[in-house]
Amino acid sequence: MAHLVLPGEPDRRLFAPPSRRAVAADDRLSADAALRTMSAGIALLWHADYPAARRLLAAVNRRIPQPPPDDYPRYRADRARRARLLSLLYVPLDPGHVIPLHRAPDVRTACTAVYGPLDAAAALPLRELLGVLGAAEWRRKGVAVPALGARIHPHYGVFAPVRQEYVDLVAQTPLPGRDLAFDIGTGTGVLAAVLAHRGVRRVVATDTSPRAVACATENLARLGFAGRTEVVPADLFPPGRAPLVVANPPWLPGRLRGPLDHAVYDPGSRMLRGFLDRARRHLTPDGEAWLVLSDLAEHLGLRTREELLGWIAAAGLRVVGRTEAAPRHPRAFDPADPLHRARAAEVTSLWRLSP
């Protein structure tokens, strides 16, 4: 038995109560036996070939029963349970973020960027490590943004602009003015970059996430917009008023179940309603608030169009225009996935709102 420690958080014990146990595992362990052990809340610390650990993780995932296809709340709960279960397969890390397993990849740069230096032996869920490595590749290659004619480089934990209909909407809607704009919840800084690219003379971007602030600052500097843009940590709005305030809040109301859910889920629609309720105080009299929002929540039964229009009216705003775009989903359609079925009917809108 052993305790497992996540790099960067030496006092955090990563166990599902009540067992708080870990056992050694190697390629003699079958996927069925691994699933039984992990279902009991017992973590597995891998000691064999690294590719075999990846094969075991995939095999265990295939053995977890799928939720009912028409029940989105159960679907979400299943995804969270599946993530917790699969996160009980760990790989060891030596100081310096070195995996002491045969045929293991070099993860030093990727892990240091996320966790900082590692001076003691630790262990990391293989599922999380794969996410860190995938994010490092996104950051290295970047995401092509045709509206910019350039690439945006997302950091780990910051939503990557792989779907770009919302970017195109901001790139094509007529501007109410070019003096100043606020980009609320900037993420990678892609919308701030689009506004600067369109000739807005000063853009102030905000975000509550330190990772996002660093990511947006880096991207805007790389694109040559550092002199006309500023990224500040703030809960929604910076001080002052602007002719244009833009927000692309998370599109689904729902409880956060993991650290990467912030880009997709907005608990209690807090960001959406906060943006609407406070927009008037940060708009010039003839300014516009641009709300970029998908109707995915409506197709999933999580919010109605009447609720959204009611929140807009209650905030003292009126709709002066709306532009729509059908998303281009890169993933194959899975009829058993309720999220995929809803996305087949999804429309993304840019709502132009004024006081």
Image: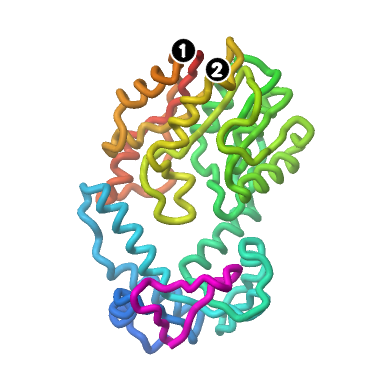
227 or 152, nearer to the observer: 227
* Percent of width and height locating residue 330: 44, 45
The disc at residue 273 is none
User: Circle 2 sits on which residue?
Assistant: 288
Specify the farthest residue to the right. 227
104 or 1, which lies in front? Answer: 1
The secondary structure type at the circle numbered 1 is strand
Name the residue at 62% across, 67% down: 111
Q: Nearer the viewer, residue 340 or 200?
A: 200
The image shows residue 250 at horizontal and vertical percentages of 45, 39
Residue 196 position (above or below residue 259): above
The image quarter in which residue 220 lies: top right
Tell me the kind of residue under disc 1.
Val
Q: Are marks 1 and 2 in contact (CB under 8 Å)?
A: yes
**Magenta span of residues:** 1-24
> Label 2 is placed on what type of residue?
Glu
Q: Residues within 10 Å of mark 2 (few under 14, many from 20)?
A: many
Image spot of residue 12 (x, y percent): 52, 70
The question of residue 55 being in magenta is answered with no
Q: Residue at x 63, y 53 (%)?
A: 139
Which residue is tagged 1? 320
x 36%, y 32%: residue = 295
Look at the image and say whether residue 17 sits in the magenta stretch: yes
Secondary-structure class at tag 2: strand
Using the rendered view, name the quadrant where residue 208 is placed. top right
On screen, residue 337 versus residue 261, left or right, reads: left
